[in-house]
Image: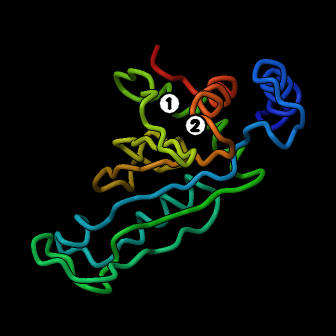
Amino acid sequence: MYLKEKYTKQVLPELMKSEGYANIMQAPKIEKIVLNMWIGTYIKQGNKDFEPLKQALNLISGQACTVRYAKKSISNFKLREGMPVWLSVTLRGEKMYNFLEKMIDVVLPRVRDFRWIPKKSFDNEGNYNFWIKEHTIFPEVPQNDVVKTHGLQITISTKNTTKDSWRKLLELMGVPFAK
């Protein structure tokens, strides 16, 4: 079932009933999904062209990514001000639901030795963070063009007041948490 329809027809009524919300606006919902790819080590190795990584993240997310630059120099990390450090994409609306559905149904089952996603990665603001070690598990990335695999940090931002309701929302949406 399409994930947005699943949220409106199954998940939302279940949350309203179990948590005792009087209004739909009180129920938790997913606000955005942010994808970040660290390219600092790629740049430090002398590779000035990170276009293949941009292309891969664009294919994974379905929209153009932005390059994040270092704000200040840190000598211990061999980081200079103005150096490209991150590639970032923020997904909202339909693209967010499409990405989450693809991640749950297609991508996570392709992870080698998949041990489920930990439940402990929630912060106090309603964000759930987890890390994928290889960006090549996404079916959109052409395997022949990959020189080196890169990790991908995924942040799912939700709106509500308690960690239990955030966790329950993502469990009902189908995110495979560890038992």
**Do the CB atoms of the residues marked 1 and 2 lie less than 8 Å apart?**
yes
The residue shown at (43%, 41%) is: 130
Mark identifier at residue 68:
none
Q: Residues within 10 Å of mark 2 (few under 14, many from 20)?
A: some
The residue shown at (43%, 50%) is: 153
Front one among 1 and 138: 1
Position in image of residue 13 (x %, y %): 86, 24
Residue 42 falls left or right of residue 93: left
Front one among 167 and 155: 167
Position in image of residue 164 (x %, y %): 59, 27
Mark identifier at residue 103:
2
Residue under pointer 1 = 108
The residue shown at (76%, 53%) is: 93
Spatial CA span between label 1 and label 2? 6 Å
95 lies above or below 112:
below
The residue shown at (14%, 75%) is: 78
Amino acid, disc 2: Met
Query: Along the polypeptide, which appears first: circle 1 or circle 2?
Result: 2
Position in image of residue 103 (x %, y %): 58, 37
